[in-house]
Structure formats: structure tokens, C-alpha cells
Amino acid sequence: MKKYLIIPFIAFLFSLLSACNTGTQMDDFLGVRPSDAILTSNVQKALYLNDDPVIANLHAESIDGTVVLTGYVKKIHQSDEAEAIARGTRGVKSVKNNIIVRQ
């Protein structure tokens, strides 16, 4: 009788363990890449924590690891700094800078 229970038990364990190893399309070369919502939140937080209030008011959105920056700044160096902050955020693959410089 025990012989007949071993095979279903092994099948159950195999299915249980294989379900634990399901990956997503978010797997990156170095590990798991954060979701776009988390990535957007992290970039927004990094921009907000900057000393420049103009940079803190910029908007970030991410799609498949690409961060899109939008908003208005007074000087080009503010746009460049915001782009550098976004690029320095973990999980960002690329940055598209749509920031408009107003004088």
C-alpha cells in the first residue's frame, strides 16, 4: 500500500517545488528588476530628495525599465541633473528626457 502512495507524493512535491521557481519577464541579468510602478516611485523619490525644488517638482514615469522625465525647469543644468538622478536609480535601463527648459 505504501508503494502506491510514494508516486503521488513525489509528484506532489515536484509540482510544489517547481511552482516556487516560476520566473517573470522582469528577470534581469543581475537578478529581478523592480516593476515599473516601483521604479517610477524610486525615481520620483530620488528627484524629490534633491535640494533643488524645481527638480523635486518634475514628473517621472516608467515603461519596461525606460524612465520618461517630464516637466519644466529654468536652466539646462537642472534638466541634466534630473536625468543623471534617474539614470543613477537602480533598475533603470534608459532615460528619455522630455523636460522643457523655460527662461
Image (tube, rainbow, N blue to C red):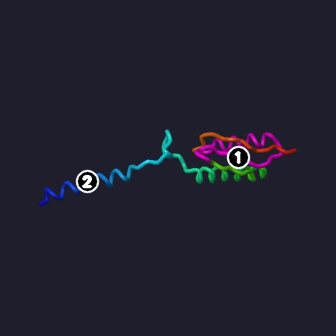
Label 2 Cα neighbours within 10 Å, binned few <14 / some 14-19 / many ≥20: few
State whether residue 77 is above or below residue 49.
above
Asked whether 69 falls inside the magenta stretch, the response is yes
In percent of width and height, residue 50 lies at 72, 49
**Quadrant in which residue 3 is drawn:** bottom left
Q: Which residue is mark 2?
A: 11
Asked whether 46 falls inside the magenta stretch, the response is no
**Nearer to the camera, 32 or 63:** 63
- At 68% from the left edge and 41% from the top edge, which residue is drawn? 96
In percent of width and height, residue 58 lies at 74, 51
Which quadrant of the figure contains the N terminus?
A: bottom left
In whole angstroms, how far apart are the C-alphas of marks 1 and 2? 50 Å
Residue ranking furthest to the right: 103
**Nearer to the camera, 37 or 83:** 37
Q: Secondary structure at mark 2?
A: helix
- At 78% from the left edge and 40% from the top edge, which residue is drawn? 77
In percent of width and height, residue 14 lies at 29, 51
- At 31% from the left edge and 53% from the top edge, which residue is drawn? 15
- At 43% from the left edge and 48% from the top edge, which residue is drawn? 23
In percent of width and height, residue 89 lies at 62, 45
Kindly identify the amino acid type of the residue bearing the numbered disc 2. Answer: Ala
Residue ranking furthest to the left: 1
Q: Which residue is mark 1?
A: 69
Q: Nearer the N terminus, badge 1 or badge 2?
A: 2
Residue ranking furthest to the bottom: 1
Q: Which residues are magenta?
A: 63-90
